[in-house]
Amino acid sequence: MELNPGQFMEHAVIALEDIQLRTALERGTGNADGRRRQVMAELDTSAALRAQARGARLRGLAELPDLLEQMERNVVASGGHVLWAKDAAEANQHILDICRQHNLKRGVKSKSMVTEEIGMLPVLEAHGIKMVETDLGEFIVQVNDSHPSHIVMPVMHMTKEEVRDLFMSKLGMEHTDDAEDMTAFARKILREEFLSADFGMSGGNFMIAETGTVVIVTNEGNGRLSTGMPPLHIAVVGIEKVIPTWEDFATLVQLLPRSGTGQRMTVYVNMFNGPARTAEPDGPQEFYLVLLDNGRSDIYASEYTEALACIRCGACLNACPVYQNVGGHSYGSVYSGPIGAVLTPLFKGKSLASALPFASSLCGACKQACPVDINIPDMLLRLRHDLESEQEAMWQVGMKAWNFGNRHPLLYEVGGKVASAATRMLTQAAGQERLNNLPYPLSGWTDHRDFPPFASQSFHDWWRQNRGD
């Protein structure tokens, strides 16, 4: 399955006709958003906490270069290795070099959107390195040879029945409709992978600069097994994830699970500073941290810096009426929903994802749900303006022609008569009352809505006929 952000409209039309997808989305987004509202309402100081969390993220971005250098120093001081990657190709090359250096052939990985972003698994597979996703949702996606459809819940697009059929056909599971039985079946497979892996991988929810600590939050325990059991651990983290202090983390970790899964706290909060040491013998013998840019510096230097404050909770997706109806795969990107409609054009290029900024009703539900109060609607409007500005020359010519025609009565009247005759002729030829297939550039209208034909008699003609001059 190939992701293509340039085909949002086509994918959305197909998604709207998929009854099973609509059922899965209704269950998933409804439950997640409902739980978020419930647990956030328990906090009397939720508004103040959001403001504090926003401050923590913006302060981290304001000090980003210094914090990244501090992070590197502390990781190295703890015995780890830090590698910098300017793009996806360099990040994947770093990972391949580590695997060759240590003769690694079999890995396990906890959930990480950034490794999806760089397309890591196909690269490793092409070089004979087996990598198994150990998050249950990501494992299902891998078995299905697909892509995650949600930042937090990768298989929100699938119903329980679809997962059952997938496990039966691809993994030989016996028939069952019990979710616990399906989970136990997957757990048995994954335990063997943990025991046989020679390296583990993770992403990072946060990097705490003052101690050089990478933090991941999980619910299944796979994160701890992936990072602690194998002899080598590689963490791939976007540079924007760094925050200054543990106090900042204490604020953010209260909001991430509440916003993402509707929990007061996730089951596991895993923190690692580097490899095992004499005083702390548990953990991997080698630790590598790959700091990924991949376009983040360009965003950092633009008017869209605030988008990097995202903590990847997925709350904006669950609250968005567009996502609720078309799902994540329609966006054709690793990052879907409202925040994806901002990030994807900035990562991939505005012209390659030009439809995504318009995939929003601008209702503001995403901003209201965001735990760090990112003004997503405002950025979507700015992206729309940027896209329109790139077509400004054509727009200016069109507006000047429209202005000229409307300022000259004869041209206006002749134009109206020509349009009336043409649209009536087209509707008669098509045997329709309204047009739905006008040629370019008018197809920009009829691709999405019908065009009523002009009246057979203009208002000017009616006035002359009934009221005189």
Image (cartoon, rainbow, N blue to C red):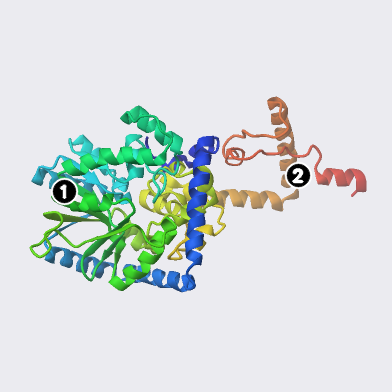
Q: Can you see residue 378?
A: no
Numbered label tally: 2
**Image location of residue 350, percent across then percent down:** 42, 50
- Horizontal side of 396 relative to 96 (left or right) equals right
Callout 1, which amino acid?
Pro
Q: Secondary structure at mark 1?
A: loop
Foreground: 121 or 253?
Answer: 253
Q: CA distance from mark 1 to mark 2?
A: 79 Å
Residue 378 lies left or right of residue 272; in this view the side is right
Q: Position of residue 207 (x, y in %)?
A: 27, 63
- Judging by the rendered image, the residue that carries numbered circle 2 is 413
Select label 1 or label 2 by which is in front: 1
Q: Nearer the viewer, residue 390 or 44?
A: 44
Q: Secondary structure at mark 2?
A: helix
Which label belongs to residue 116? none
Instruction: Report the residue that reaches farthest toward the left.
Output: 278
Looking at the image, residue 92 lies above or below residue 263: above
Q: What is the x, y in percent for residue 48?
A: 46, 74
What is the x, y in percent for residue 62? Answer: 33, 70
Circle 1 residues within 10 Å: few <14, some 14–19, many ≥20: many
Residue 243 appears anywhere in the view: yes
Q: Nearer the N terminus, badge 1 or badge 2? A: 1
Which numbered dot is residue 230?
A: 1
Q: Is residue 421 above or below residue 364?
A: above
Could you tell me the amino acid type at mark 2? Glu
